[in-house]
Amino acid sequence: MFYIDNILNANGRSLAGFPHLPQLNRHLINVGSNRLIAGEREYNAEEERIRFSELYSRLNIQQKEIYTTIVNTATEERRGFYFVSGCGGTGKTFLWRTLISSIRSQGKIVLSVAS
Ligand SMILES: Nc1ncnc2c1ncn2[C@@H]1O[C@H](COP(=O)(O)OP(=O)(O)OP(=O)(O)O)[C@@H](O)[C@H]1O
């Protein structure tokens, strides 16, 4: 919506003139220029903690091993680059969700991207 608003602005209009469309979250727009980081600060750490507890308790042995390796790297502020591969449906996304909620539950920022 930010980009649509920019295009409208370039033509003398704005999203506000289209009230039936989703409107901009001004808070996200105004926090510096990095909206990704601003978005990350929107998460409720307590909700993430509850999500993390539930997900973590269900990790299988292999997922837990990968989880621990990656989290230890982050906790010890070491640099790491991990590539997790596996057949479809083997739990990679489940693992990512656990890692992401773990980091967000600590109020830290995680930028999740697809490649
Ligand atoms: N440890 C687990 N406990 C319970 N359910 C799990 C666990 N790991 C994965 N699942 C479930 O198994 C299904 C497949 O997992 P997931 O989507 O994470 O696999 P994937 O490896 O990312 O698959 P794909 O490569 O096809 O995207 C999902 O419904 C997920 O919730």
Image (cartoon, rainbow, N blue to C red):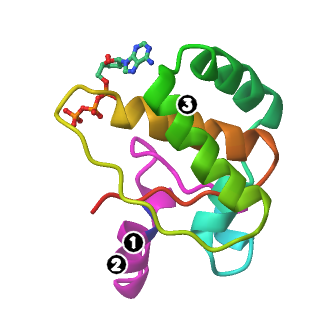
- Camera-side mark, 1 or 3: 3
List the residue tagged with mark 3: 64
Q: Mark 2 points at which residue?
A: 7
**Residue 98, percent from left and from top:** 56, 33
Q: In the image, is the residue at mark 3 within 8 Å of ligand 1 by its beta carbon?
A: no
Query: Dot 1 corresponds to which residue?
Result: 3
54 up-or-down from 12: above or below: above
Gap in Å between the C-alphas at discs 1 and 3? Answer: 40 Å
Disc 1 marks a residue whose amino acid type is: Tyr
Element under disc 3:
helix
Instruction: Name which residue lies at 41% across and 74% down.
Output: 13
- Say if mark 1 contacts mark 2, CB within 8 Å: yes
Q: Position of residue 107 (x, y in %)?
A: 81, 49
Please provide the residue range marked out in magenta.
3-27
Q: Is residue 100 left or right of residue 22?
A: right
Please rate how many residues cluster around mark 1, counting C-alpha atoms within 10 Å: few if below 14, some from 14 to 19, many from 20.
few
